[in-house]
Image (cartoon, rainbow, N blue to C red):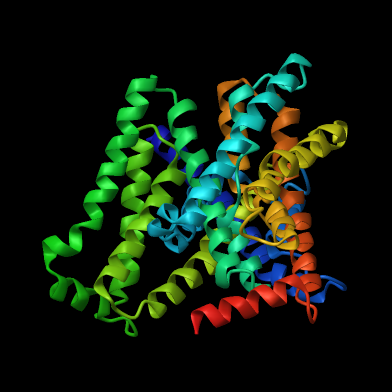
Amino acid sequence: MGLRAGDQLSGAATLTQGLDTLLAVATVAAVAPIIAAALPGKRVPQVVILIFLGIVIGPHGLGLASPPSIELLSNIGLGFLFLLAGYELDPHLLRERPGRLAMVGWALSAALAVGVVGLLTALHFVYDYVPVGLALTTTALGTLLPILRDNDMLEGRFGRHVLAAGAVGELFPIIAISLFLTRLGSFVALGSLLAVATAALLLTALPRVIGAARFRAVIQQGRQATAQTTLRWAIVLLLVLLAGAARFGLDVVLGAMLAGMVLRTWTRRMGVDVEPLETKLEAVGYGIFIPIFFVASGMTLDIHEIISAPLRLVVFLVLLLVVRGLPSLLIYARVLPLIQRLEMTFITATTMPLLIALAEIGLKDGTMLPANAAALVGAGVLSVLLYPSAAAALRRYGQRPGGPDALTAKQDRELAG
């Protein structure tokens, strides 16, 4: 009886701590857009404010919140972020010229990363070759989407290249993480990856199995009522592939991105109006779970490590621009004007969620220095703050009367017409 009473007290304390943390996180998420609107000058992305406030309330700040108590909700938020990124990805785009160029650009970034991180390893600056190398090849498409939409940077030919580069910059590193940073053997990891990919492929065929008319009726049922059938099944799909990836020892972001791609295939194949579902997914994701992920990420960021070794943060921030961004100047030379290639340089160098995942993997494996883990995540935060703003400033400059962006937009409209 004493043990049971002790367990009950421990459980009550854990529940209280979890609720206190969730209250603090929810308050931060509600306050963030107000702060963003009140700040003078250029608009600061809410993501940065969420992370900064997470630092303030976290164990390295005021100690008002405990990251482990909301870890599950944070992981679901990460899943939603990549589900929405996968949903934006048109698989056909990867087979077209934007996709081919994006893959060439990523391969060039990977080659640069091998050389750069090899040099840093020889200088004893890093000891975690693979996680740091992969980190330098990532692009945060899910984080960028709302910023790019706000600046009208997803339209026309340029938008297709942005979506392709962002998708490749997320999908390829995720696959590499699943293959090279798992505790499984290489052949087992490859088999697990193929198993999860096969499961996702089979799920895309579900409408044909059920029947197009019946599946369309399910999608349309209760879209504006309390049933919310499509939203519930979208969440089930996300959790199925998240759980499958975790069970196979793969990174859960792979399952989330595949879930988004499967969901896109379902809705597009049935030819139904997808706007209500997209609105609901964004409301649940950006309204509830994704802010929890970003605040929790700030809570785990060790600001003291960054302050004690600021040079590491600067080095990683610059390397993100050099390794991931600069190849855009070369590979898009024949398809985009110089100013748009400069925009692509800053866009592709923007990253963060995968840096958090890679830092956690490195710390768990004991191969990554805590200072490097903190500096990587800090560099990702700064990249979200600085690089999209630089790209948006270039866009405004290019859209002036007679500017190259304005001329390209006119050409796109003429081609579309």
**Residue occupying the point 49% across, 58% down:** 85
Q: Which of the 4 image quadrants contains residue 122? A: top right
Quadrant the N terminus occupies? top left
Q: Is residue 290 above or below residue 245?
A: below
Q: Position of residue 385 (x, y in %)?
A: 76, 57
Q: Is residue 92 visible?
A: yes
In the rendered view, does 13 fall on the left or right side of 232?
A: right
Q: Position of residue 40 (x, y in %)?
A: 87, 73
**Residue occupying the point 79% across, 60% down:** 390
In the rendered view, does 167 fall on the left or right side of 25?
A: left
**Residue occupying the point 65% across, 37% down:** 136
Q: Toward the viewer: 31 or 269?
A: 269
Q: Toward the viewer: 9 or 331?
A: 331
Q: Which of the 4 image quadrants contains residue 315? A: top right
Q: Which of the 4 image quadrants contains residue 89? A: bottom left
Q: Position of residue 37 (x, y in %)?
A: 77, 76
Q: Is residue 61 above or below residue 88?
A: above
**Residue occupying the point 80% across, 78% down:** 400
Q: Residue furthest front?
A: 334
Q: Position of residue 334 (x, y in %)?
A: 63, 55
